Image: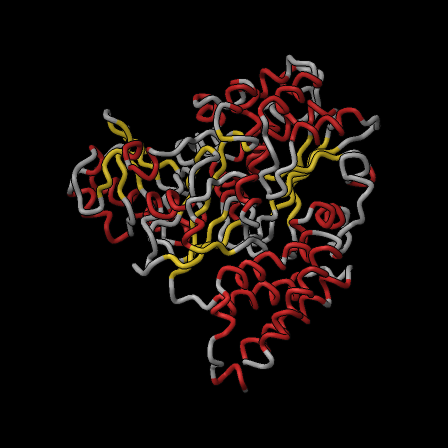
Amino acid sequence: MTKVYVPRDAAALSMGADAVARAIAKEAKKAKADVEIVRNGSRGMLWMEPLVEVETAEGRVAYGNVSAGDVASLFKADFLNGGKHALSQGLTEEIPYFKNQERLTFARCGLTDPLSIADYQAHGGFEGLTKALTMDPADIVAEVTESGLRGRGGAAFPTGIKWKTVHDTDAEQKYVCCNADEGDSGTFADRMLMEGDPFCLIEGMTIAGIAVGATKGYIYIRSEYPHAVKAFREAIEILTEANWLGRKIQGSPYDFELYVRVGAGAYICGEETSMLESLEGKRGLVRYKPPLPAIEGLFGKPTVINNVLSFGSVPIILAKGGAYYRDFGVGRSRGTLAFQLAGNIKQGGLVEKAFGVTARELIEDFGGGTLSGRPVRAVQFGGPLGAYLPNDKLDTQMDYEAFMKVDAMVGHGGLVVFDDTVDMARMARFAMEFCTIESCGKCTPCRIGSVRGMEVIDRIIAGTDREANIELLKDLCVTMTDGSLCAMGGLTPMPVMSALNHFPGDFQRPPRAEAAE
């Protein structure tokens, strides 16, 4: 029997992967070929989706941008044996985009059937959890601390310190919460992992529960990810049935139950305390700190809150040791990060690399430059609240401290590329406009400051008293940065000030007719 892999990832589905799978089944039946169609996750080469793979004696052979209309010609080209075709990409593992990555968190994504326990275990799944079940919880925390893992959601807080705080806090009930409200523009790594390797995330959350003494966990998934929600609910059912979740996991003394909760479209619920409010059935408003969620979190109990990629990194840390993971990366930025290439880029997709790779390497070597073929002028890092960096800053190493030195942040690993046609004054305005729409409204600097910021930038674009309004904008940005309750208002000035500092000429352009009206 020949295995043919057709992704079930949302990106592939949007490009007709279901129709491709049906066409392959139909054509195989017509040819009386013994074919098993496996609906795998995405390999991350999104510009090639749907990427169909065929298992051969030499390895898996890839065919890119396959449509249902291509299937008949693929069969004629003997693609079940890796035959040559116009859509052939060769051996998947040898495609430079994929070959030159360091896949730790995404090692299985695109390789396995996401909902097959046997497939998961055949590729190293549950090795970390099996080891954790035999360890003292404090030793698990120490291993994670040793790895140097920091929060992958953007804040980069040391994961081991957060876990130790929850571990050391006495309480009858503790919780583990996964923030899967991936709302940043240009990001899709959380979605890819949830759809392509949900068992990995569940394993990481379960290890966290054992480490800190939590018996219940919640994953908060954004409503815009219906395929991830469906895959994750199915994964929980499968693992509960197999006793990898629930009471006395695999005969151990540890219990851990996991529940899915779906957001309602609020960007602010990506902030951890707003997420807790939403999980408790309330409006997503930011909480004051202290108390920290690690001490008084969900329902007032000690709570570990981490991002999808943070939990997804834990299984390999437990399986191979903290020192193994720490050997990847540079400085205080250890391990790997799944960088997501988006915007005006020729080869958009996911690239998992050790910290230390430069933005230019990601954009040019992996991304192939801009889709338009024009020069790169600016790249926004870390979502809509991240800085815009010019071309001459793209040789900065991708690590947390190096980016702080250039007044930027790595964030969740998203890169949105712009060519030389972009108007950075209008991109600065977009940052303020985004904040006006997504602010929870609890604090004045964010709620009112973003509205005033948009008005001030409108006056600058229109050519009204520009120098005075630029000074006013700078002053407003200081107020928002220093006075906002959370990063929503506190970081909105980052893209604005980066545009103002790196692209001052865009704020001096002749007014457009529509801007003056």
Residue in the picture at 48% in, 54% down: 389
Q: In the displayed image of the protein, which residue is found farthest to the front?
A: 467
Between residue 22 and residue 490, name the one nearer to us. Answer: 490
Residue 49 visible from this viewpoint: no
Between residue 471 and residue 227, name the one nearer to us. Answer: 471
The vertical placement of 460 against 198, above or below, is: below
Say whether residue 87 is left or right of residue 204. Answer: left
The vertical placement of 434 against 163, above or below, is: below
Give percent across and percent down for residue 258: 66, 34
Residue in the picture at 43% in, 48% down: 394
Q: Quadrant of residue 300?
A: top right
Residue 27 visible from this viewpoint: yes
The vertical placement of 501 against 147, above or below, is: below
Residue in the picture at 74% in, 28% down: 214
Q: Quadrant of residue 292?
A: top right
- The quarter in which the C terminus is drawn is bottom right
Q: How many marks?
A: 0
Give percent across and percent down for residue 379: 45, 54
> Which color scheme is applied?
secondary structure
Q: In the displayed image of the protein, which residue is found farthest to the top?
A: 134
Residue in the picture at 40% in, 42% down: 44
Between residue 471 and residue 116, name the one nearer to us. Answer: 471
Q: In the displayed image of the protein, which residue is found farthest to the bottom?
A: 517
- The quarter in which the N terminus is drawn is top left
Say whether residue 495 is left or right of residue 277. Answer: left
Say whether residue 302 is left or right of residue 71. Answer: right
Give percent across and percent down for residue 244: 60, 24
Between residue 177 and residue 317, name the one nearer to us. Answer: 317
Say whether residue 31 is left or right of residue 220. Answer: left
